[in-house]
Amino acid sequence: MAEKFLMPKLSPTMEEGQISQWVKNEGDAFEANETLAEVDTDKATMEMTALSGGTLLKILKDAGDTAALGETIAIIGQAGEDIADLLKEVSSNGKSEPEKPATDDTKRTKSEKEPASSDDVNSPHVSQGSASPDSPSSNVKTAKSEEPSSPPAQASNTNGRLIVSPIAARMAAENGVDLKSISGSGPNGRIIKRDIEAAVSGRSSASDGQKQTFTPSNQVGASAFRDEQTSKIRQVIASRLAESIGPIPTFYLTVEIEMDNTLAVRKQINANLDDDAKISVNDIIIKAAAMSLLRHPWVNASYQDKTVRFYEQADIGVAVAIDEGLITPVVRGANMKGLAEISAEIKDLAAKAKSKKLQPEEYTGATFSISNLGMMGVKEFTAIINPPEAAIIAIGGANHTPVVRAGEIKIRSIMNVTMSCDHRVIDGATGAKFLQTFKQMLESPAMMLM
């Protein structure tokens, strides 16, 4: 019997999802446990998987469209069934239906296991590229970057808007490419990265051997602009920023740490490891933070209205930059793991984050977070706390700095670390003592063995 296929809840904080692509087309048959579509949630791209076999009779939400939880996105059933009544019912209900509890008759996707703790999207600093004056002023509807290709089609849909991936939109702005002149080769005419690359390449070839001339103009109007649909991850980042910086009383502590001994230890360890197994400075920082947290339980805690929750192990959230913002994969029990194990886990989690394949349990429930921008040349910054955690440390770069030691000027690798603290849990002295321990462990790495 034909029935409605509803937008399911694919992550703990998901309120709506954006169809990234339909893996099956209208009229295609599918088996149980087979993927029908990919959906961009607030955290990652998730697969919608059928629990029973059937046929995809009608797609109601195309690639790039957004649907609320419980909203009808397709109709499934057996081939040849009459779906006129269902289409009429969906149309009469409007575009959105209220979220419905999953039952055996309505549930058509695998539900993800939801962890008990709240989500951990890190907040600070990454911004989107700005639009070029040459960018079109029409609305642009964003979609997941780079999908499997389909036959080229016109980029504009029936309502005159453009469907363009975030990467393609950014490349077009940077290279002054008019998106209206591009025919998208992605699903449903979506403009993707290779379309912009082809346009830029063709323009370069046409201009080879020609001398460029520039004519000044006194007639300069207001800059053209482009509106891009906000990704789910960016929406959650914005929400979490407002939740954190407003109601949470935050104070900041900064300390300078000599990293020479840590750098020497890292060099010694890596001399005995294969290239793909070498550890980073950040791996050692994670271990030092985890060991320090065990000595300062009030930092490894969270405020829970009428109680303070103390965690028995250090689950460290590590900020990773992706196209849509930042996400914090979690290294569970970092205090119990060696540097090589932490390094391998971070590489695996970072790769999953960048390909949007993280599962909810891999990015939620951290007890403390680290944001490191030192590798980008940033000397010092402040990071925003991820509720319900009580603190986050912002790591700057280690720079050669002249310091006075025993009355003599020495050159040391100095790293600035700033800790953001939730004053409902952490007092000034508590935060300072934690940083003192953290500093001692990095300046004397052998302390991590105690």
Image (cartoon, helix red, strand yellow):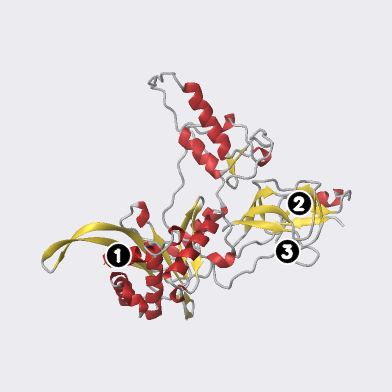
Residue at the disc numbered 3:
100
On screen, residue 375 versus residue 222, left or right, reads left
Residues at marks 3 and 1 touching, judged by CB atoms closer than 8 Å: no
Please give the name of the residue rendered at 75% of the width and 48% of the height, measured from the top-left corner: 59
Along the line of sight, which residue is nearer the eye, 205 or 296?
A: 205
Q: Secondary structure at mark 3?
A: loop
Q: How many C-alpha atoms fall within 10 Å of the one at disc 2: few (<14), some, or many (≥20)?
A: many
Residue 264: which numbered mark, if any? 1
Residue type for callout 1: Ala
On screen, residue 103 versus residue 253, left or right, reads right
- Return the x and y of residue 51 as percentages of the image width and height: 77, 62
Residue type for callout 3: Lys
Along the line of sight, which residue is nearer the eye, 274 or 438?
A: 274
- Return the x and y of residue 166 as percentages of the image width and height: 54, 44
Along the line of sight, which residue is nearer the eye, 102 or 181?
A: 181
Q: Is residue 14 above or below residue 28?
A: below
- Return the x and y of residue 195 as percentages of the image width and height: 58, 35
Residue 365: which numbered mark, if any? none
